[in-house]
Image: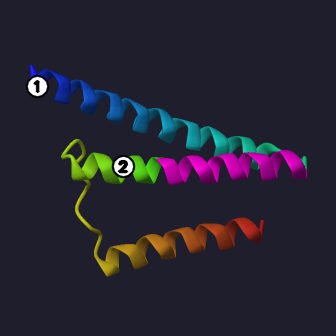
Amino acid sequence: MQVQGQMQDKDMVNDILSTINCSLVNYATSIAQSSDQNLRQTLQQIRNADEQFQYQLYKMAEQKGFYKPAEQASPQEIQQVRSIFTAATTAGATI
């Protein structure tokens, strides 16, 4: 019976994490498309709070064994991704 309870907890946590991740994408889209500064700031504040909650829930899920993160990226991989995004951002700024 306890295993079933643990599975339900794991499923609920993973479902909440998935829902928050989708919400974060939607916040980013809404922020990018909003021209009203007050609305942008409000959405950014909500997004930031949701990001903090998502990270706290993720850490709890990881500690309980509900979630196994991907392997850590190497410094070279991080630099490669940084270079790609920097180049894309610079190219977008010059258009």
Distance in Å between CA atoms under marks 1 and 2: 22 Å
The residue tagged with tag 1: helix, strand or loop?
A: helix
Element type at mark 2: helix
Task: Find residue 70 and report its horizontal and vertical position in percent.
Answer: 25, 56
Quadrant for the N terminus in the image: top left
Check residue 73 for magenta coloring: no
Q: Main secondary structure of the magenta part?
A: helix
Question: At x 62% / y 54%, what residue is drawn?
Answer: 48
> Relative to 84, is 33 above or below?
above
- Which mark is in front, 1 or 2? 1
Residue type at tag 1: Gln
- Left or right: 57 with respect to 51? left
**Magenta segment boundaries in residue numbering:** 37-53
Question: Residue 63: where, in percent of width, then height?
Answer: 23, 52
User: In the figure, 3 relative to 31: above or below?
Assistant: above
Query: Circle 1: is it few (<14), some (14-19), or many (20+) Cα within 10 Å?
Result: few
Which residue carries the number 1 mark?
Answer: 2
Q: How many marks?
A: 2
Q: Measuring from the top left, give residue 80's x and y in whole percent.
A: 41, 75
Q: Position of residue 36 (x, y in %)?
A: 90, 47
Residue positioned 43% across, 53% down in the render: 55
